[in-house]
Amino acid sequence: MTDQHPVTPPSELLQEWYDNTKTDYFTDMICAAQWGADQELVACGNYLKQCAAWEEEDVIELYNYRRPGPPPASLKEQALMALEDGNTVSGASLTSNEVDIIRRALEQLDD
């Protein structure tokens, strides 16, 4: 295909999806739809930077709004991450936010 539409996945990517899913046609469709939507979002962001004089930070905010990350971690996961971030070296300390997260997690435990 020489005149490929800009949101048509490259043949290598199509082959990768096929190899990873083999018989799961719906997974292939989901991957293709997500890829096409991501390409369109990037193109819109590039357009806004060029024609509407948007700053890079504005475009990143748009990307983050339209493609939010995974759901927030549970309180238990947040508390464990806070403990890991606190390091284990002598004299290490936790921030007040980390202490608050750990406190709320402990308060949810049954006695």
Image (cartoon, helix red, strand yellow):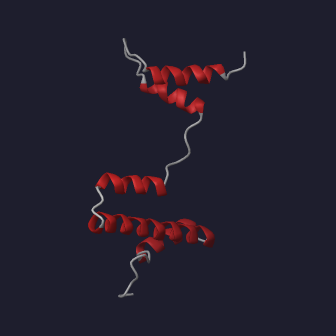
* Residue 92 drawn above or below residue 31: above
The residue depicted at 48 percent of the width and 57 percent of the height is 66
- Quadrant, the N terminus: bottom left
In this view, the residue farthest toward the bottom is 2
The residue depicted at 53 percent of the width and 65 percent of the height is 20
Residue 65 position in % (x across, y down): 47, 54
Q: Is residue 19 visible?
A: no
Residue 97 position in % (x across, y down): 47, 24
Residue 19 position in % (x across, y down): 52, 69
In this view, the residue farthest toward the front is 52
The front one of 3 and 41 is: 41
* Residue 47 drawn above or below residue 76: below
The residue depicted at 48 percent of the width and 68 percent of the height is 37
Number of marks: 0
- Quadrant, the C terminus: top right
In this view, the residue farthest toward the top is 91
The front one of 85 and 108 is: 108
Left/right placement of residue 75 relative to residue 111 reads left
Residue 88 position in % (x across, y down): 41, 18
Q: Is residue 82 visible?
A: yes
In this view, the residue farthest toward the right is 111
Left/right placement of residue 103 relative to residue 44 reads right
